[in-house]
Amino acid sequence: MATRPKLEDERGLLDRLGELRVFLELGSLGPALPALLRAPHGDGHPVLVLPGMLASDGSTFILRRYLKALGYQVHPWKLGRNWGPSTEIRQGIRDRFKELSDRYGRKVSLVGWSLGGIYAREIAREFPSLTRQVITLGSPFGAGYRIEGEPSPELAQRLRPAPPVPCTAIYSKSDGVVPWEACLEIKGPQTDNIEVQASHIGMGVNALVLWAIADRLAQAEGRWQPFDRTGLSSYFYAETK
């Protein structure tokens, strides 16, 4: 009877050790760059990128530079290190989002890494008419983590449903930080899940993740479609089971 927990513990340890892949992901970015720059280019709409727990805008620098090279108006959150949910953080993201929406007079796309993705989905839930789409990277919005004393079941019930905008969840089954099952959007007409081979802390520099983000952002406003896994993409992106 103790075999299964032991195997699960070993799997968890392997996944955590697998986070060391970030160095390989970073090292492979240079050789992959010429191909990445051939990704679909954007229409110049604004994109707000939100960092993960304990991270800052420095962690999203490469991701933002890449999206800028593809023609987007890309912006950091400018709220320092992400120490976790607080009234100040929530209001700061809200103010930043509305500032960009007013500045460009266009809908804003949100890209959130880990906890940043949970923030992104909540902003989209609050301002759906101002949000073009949401892309999350290893964001465990279905885990029901306790935040500010709120009971976990109630929190999970509130966070799990997607906001009323196109939402794409990018996740890795070998994520060594968060449970990948909690990172999946519920299937619907405006949701999609894209599995990648990536570490959690390397998602912002992983070539497969960057390409998927570029593909999602390049869709014309109002014409969102699920990720196309046919052709060459079928070799790199598995169908979510």
Image: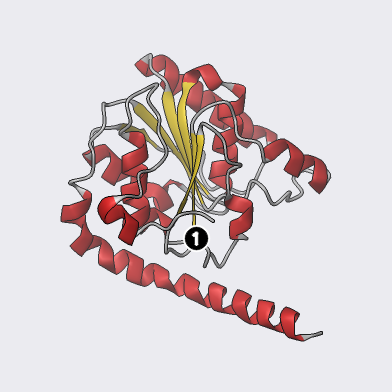
Residue at point 55%, 73% (across, down): 15
User: Residue 85 location, x and y as percent?
Assistant: 66, 42
Report the amino acid beneath label 1: Ser
Identify the residue under disc 1. Answer: 172
In this rendering, position of residue 83 left or right of residue 131: right
Relative depth, front residue between 184 and 46 = 184
In this rendering, position of residue 206 left or right of residue 41: right
Q: Quadrant of the C terminus?
A: bottom right
User: Residue 87 location, x and y as percent?
Assistant: 69, 33
Q: How is the image coloured?
A: secondary structure
- From this viewpoint, is residue 150 visible? no
User: Residue 55 location, x and y as percent?
Assistant: 51, 53
Q: Identify the image quadrant of residue 90.
A: top right
Tag 1, which secondary structure?
loop
Residue at point 43%, 19% (across, down): 101
Q: Residues within 10 Å of mark 1 (few under 14, many from 20)?
A: many
Q: Does residue 72 lie above or below 228 as drawn?
A: above
- From this viewpoint, is residue 51 visible? yes
